[in-house]
Image: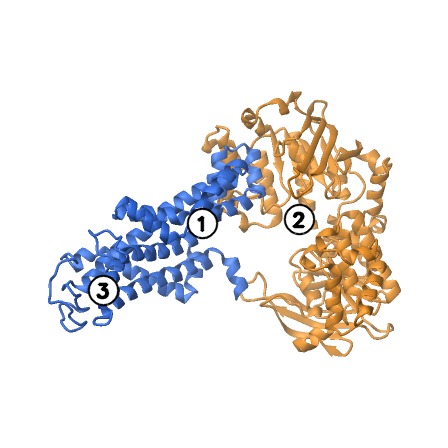
Amino acid sequence: MSGFWKRYRRNWGAVAGLAILLFVLLIALFAPLLYPVSPWQMSAPPLLDPFENSAFPLGTDMLGRDIAAGLVHGARVSLLVGTISTLCAVIAGVGIGSLAGYFGGWIDDVLMRITEFFQTIPQLAMAVVLVAIFTPSLVSIVTAIALVSWPPVARLVRAEVLSLREREFVEAARVLGRPTHLILFDEILPNALPPVIVTATLMIATAILTEAALSFLGLGDRNFMSWGFMIGAARSMLREAPWLSVMPGVAILLTVLAINLAGEGLNDALNPRLRQRGE
Amino acid sequence: MRSTRACGSGANSMGGSDARGTPLVRVENLSIRLPVGGDRPFAIEGISFTVDPGEIVCVVGESGSGKSVAANTLMGLLPQGLKISSGRVLLGDEDLAQASAARMRALRGREVSMIFQEPLSALNPLYRVSDQITELLGAHGAYPGKAGRQRILDLFGYVGLPEPERLIEAYPFQLSGGQRQRVVIAMALALEPKLILADEPTTALDVTTQAQVLDLLRKVRKDLGTAILFVTHDFGVVADIADRVLVMEKGRLVEAGAVEDVLRRPQHSYTQKLIGAVPRLEPLDLPPPGDEIVLAAEGVDKRFGTPGGWFRKARHVHAVAEASFTVRRGETLGIIGESGSGKSTLGRSIVRLIEPDAGRILFRGRDLMTISSGSFRSERKHLQMVFQDPLSSLNPRKRVRAILTDGPVAHGESRAVAEVRAAELIRLVGLTPAALERFPHEFSGGQRQRIGIARALMMEPDVIVADEPVSALDVSVQAQVLELFNELQQRLRLAMVFITHDLRVAAQLCHTVAVMQRGRIVEYGPTASVFADPQHAYTRQLFAAVPGKAFDSWRK
């Protein structure tokens, strides 16, 4: 573990990413303490400029809602949607990919055709359709994002399992008489996980972007303030009050960037051999 | 015979050049530093040697001895992170250690060329083999236009490739391993360099092909007067081809001299150890096996094939054809063959990693083939396997403790009981119980193979199938592991099926041998009589190709 951290630390970008990510996480955790009032509340005169009023450091929007409160509460939605939908997608992808890769034959054929079916439809278009059908809510958004993002995980895990199952230690486990489920989940999968973890990190970033896009299109959950909604709501004021769009935009940019940097650092730290070749 | 020998004392000039004209290559006090954090400060340290024109010099050593680094330096092909820290590498009067990249490019191929270990990866799979030689000729502006094609045809003819006119159009994948290595040699010869570096050029080849390639290299030296610096780990090959030998240990040159002197009367203790570890070609006297037949195969047959489709023809390979044998308690059967002979398929069929198409495998008289694979799982523990690659056969994410105990636990034993036995067995195979807490990558190759053996023994099997268990190991480690196998068999009265390509290894361990060729057992009998008087033409061919027979007669 200490070796892992040592390798991770060598990539300063990854460390910066992790720091930003921790900052966003803390803000999201303590949002109710920082801004106990609902971010939807019209609490001040509309269109206050940033830094104009110290009570509303980032200003207010056209309805007088506090931008800072919106950003802080929006962080909760972004991170929540990002992690939970990714978690669901990874579980589905690992399950489907490992079954397809290990058993091969018709099981592989059936599972991979299903995977390809999902992969051929543009992700965002499908997410939009799914959320529209289920009526927008956090649950439907998470489900929709998970449904459109598992196929790459399945393909990745399948490829890993395909190559790992030919390794001699898997044959050794079969000769020892270990049951199939243990061979798959105890011998093969732990060796297939590092690239999956890295992919999952990057998927969180994509999920955050998808959620923002959905909210921008008005398909967000109206019970929760989100960055995408803020941009969408402010787009008519782009000329008069650009900061209304810029602030949540920067928040998305920073968070996604941070996750990508951390993911890349994770990749280097988990695959030390690849790293050395680059140096 | 040249016999300028000196040993031991640090930076010394070994194999001096006096009275022999000017040497072609003079390496003087060469040191190459390893990156900080390596297992030793220098990849090679203070080595000096010479190579004369037309001389074949072998560099011998175990893995990690720095022998390949020493050869690659002459080609300017040091791995990243390695730099020459002191010393000179003189080719004629030119110091290659100081040469620019452009100068090295001009020298490579024209003055010095290289033959690599693995001909498949040395050739670009996307280009015709002739294109790759044409590229080399073009880079040096030699044999322009039509002359290039003629040159390649001549070279192909010279290195003994059949039908040069046809092979000139071939892609690497269409050639056999031996043919590929001939192409690589043809490429190395294209501009008639003065020196060829050959880095384990026969290690990836079968023994009969190896003998042909060694013949070819000898012919090259005789016809063209090319000097060859030949890196190898195999003393048999050294005895067959070398004029002079350099022995390396951990980056130092420990002994150098004429081949017969070094092999007959090694001075340095490391050389003595290495040479002593090379198994002899005569069968060892082994304790006689028992009477009970533990394992029998009857007419085992396996075909591999891809079914035909719209765009491809059906292909079938008869991997094992009606193989039959018996193994008694305490007996070792050696299955000997070259790559593609079906020996591994037969071994894997015994433990049912592969389902044979026909035939019976009788374990203590019970036919394992008629048992369903579900109920076979409980029979599995009696039949265990030791694998070839000790690294890939151990799960890198598990501690040795789990690797050893997972098997018994799967058969219903309690983890605590299994752990007690794991601690006993880890001692039996020559490791300390502390090894149980470590991961596979923390061990050396030989230690890993010991863990692989302990894992098989954990199941208290009656039969062990060992698939080339020592071929990935250095010769001194190989000797220890072979000894372990012998000792365990005597103690536990195991029946063993030992798959190997190496007749020397078989001689150390096997009561009976079965020689396989293209899926068929062509000769089967007691080791002593097969070795003394091989009956089948193929067996005789195998024996004729074993390298280092002169070496064996020197050792008597």
Marker count (numbered): 3
Which residue is denoted by mark 3 in the rendering? A234
Q: Earlier in the sequence, mark 3 or mark 1?
A: 1
Respond whether the residues carrying marks 3 and 2 are from the same subunit. Answer: no
Q: Colour of chain A?
A: blue
Of tags 3 and 2, which is closer to the observer?
3
The amino acid at mark 3 is: Ala
Q: Chain of mark 2?
A: B
Which residue is denoted by mark 2 in the rendering? B473
Q: Chain of mark 3?
A: A
The amino acid at mark 2 is: Leu
Q: Which chain is orange?
A: B
Q: Nearer the viewer, residue A128 or B104?
A: A128
Label at residue A120:
1
> What percent of the width, then of the height, locates residue A181?
47, 35
Q: Element type at marker 2?
A: loop
